[in-house]
Image (tube, rainbow, N blue to C red):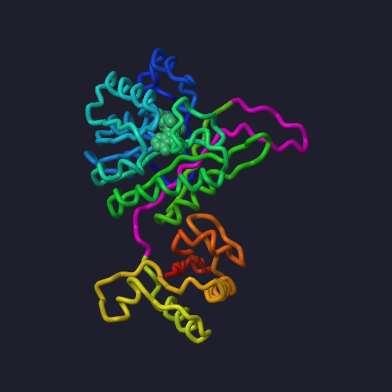
Amino acid sequence: MNDNSWLLLEYEDPRYRIPTALRARDVRAARDIGWVEQMRPFVRHFSAPGGLVLDPFAGFGTTLLAAHLEGRRSIGIELDAARAALARERLQLQQADDARMLTGDLRNLRDRLPTIDLCLTSLPYFGAPAMPETSPQQLYGQLQYEPFLEQVHEIFRSLRDCMKPGGHVIVMAENLRLDGRFVPLAWDVARVLAGLFELREERVLLYRRIAKELAPGEWHSNRSHEYALIAEVRRETLDVAAAMALWHEIQAGGHAATLRGSLARRLAGDHGVVPADMDLKVDFDATKLQALLQFLVERGFALRCWQRPLRLPVDLEALRERDYIRAERLDRDGRRLVVDVGWT
Ligand SMILES: C[S@@+](CC[C@H](N)C(=O)[O-])C[C@H]1O[C@@H](n2cnc3c(N)ncnc32)[C@H](O)[C@@H]1O
């Protein structure tokens, strides 16, 4: 891989395409299958020979085949049992004995997974029709966008527990057009990844398709590109000086919060801990919480609860079960400060 921000995909090797007989047995004739060539450069670059690659939305096992061809071991997770079976057959035909397909959802399987070096996947698209199996965990067929994104968040959150520190999570995703409406799926998923890992880079994957001239003022495109979003599994370390300055301001402002977690332990003298964020606890008292959240918003923080952006005043009763609200600020020098406001 070189440092071009794009990767041109022109040729699909027929030796690795899904066999026609298998394709014909899929409910959607495998229209949502990817190319082995799309995955191979990422496998090569972001994992070592013999390393373990995971695809949590494995479909027909394309990522697993790419991993096999590059001499890596792999695990695929696919919710649809019929597809998982097709993938197993495909991998067997390719003698990919180092690939293992599991049927299910990562959220339920994570305790059975070993440590993963690289997670490489293509996201199931919002707006795709439902699959024959009707598991509520199936992302295809989800009716609304926010709950869809929330499930994506949950899945990548579960993934975090299985990933090797320093490993990578690479997600292929496209922005969509649904009934003429532009849906920034790739950008929203990038935000999900940024909340869980350290988002590093993107590559734009370009597919050569026949282009049509547009009439002046027409703006739609043939959508022949997608993004590979590249994140690293790394706990960001807290800028302790910036966090302390904020903490002093919070105290001076008379807010009834207590400092908890790793930063509190560090201040108590445990220099072995490396805080990633600042944990505050407040009684579940609407007035106190709203005041603290307002204080943070006035200092440039954005509020989210489980990926959902929040505006003031926050409907705290609706969020009570969620235990905390995350406040995040990005400064112009690239520094990020994360404050979790929890309640007791
Ligand atoms: C884009 S397709 C993957 C195709 C794959 N990249 C390939 O080329 O072989 C996405 C797959 O994710 C599966 N899926 C959807 N929700 C899932 C979930 N919660 N857990 C596991 N798989 C899921 C779908 O059934 C679908 O087969």
Q: Is residue 316 left or right of residue 164?
A: right
Q: Find residue 116 and report its image quarter.
A: top left
Q: Dominant secondary structure of the magenta stretch? A: loop
Q: Find residue 300 and report its image quarter.
A: bottom right
- Does residue 216 belong to the magenta stretch? yes
Percent x, y of residue 214: 72, 31
Q: Residue at x 35, y 27 (%)?
A: 84
For ligand 1, the image quadrant comes to: top left
Q: Residue at x 28, y 33 (%)?
A: 70
Percent x, y of residue 283: 46, 74
Percent x, y of residue 177: 62, 37
Q: Is residue 300 left or right of residue 169?
A: right
Above or below, comparing residue 262 to residue 217 in the picture: below
Residue in the foreground of this view, choosing between 33 and 77: 77
Q: Which residues are magenta?
A: 210-236
Residue in the foreground of this view, choosing between 7 and 160: 160
Q: Residue at x 39, y 16 (%)?
A: 22
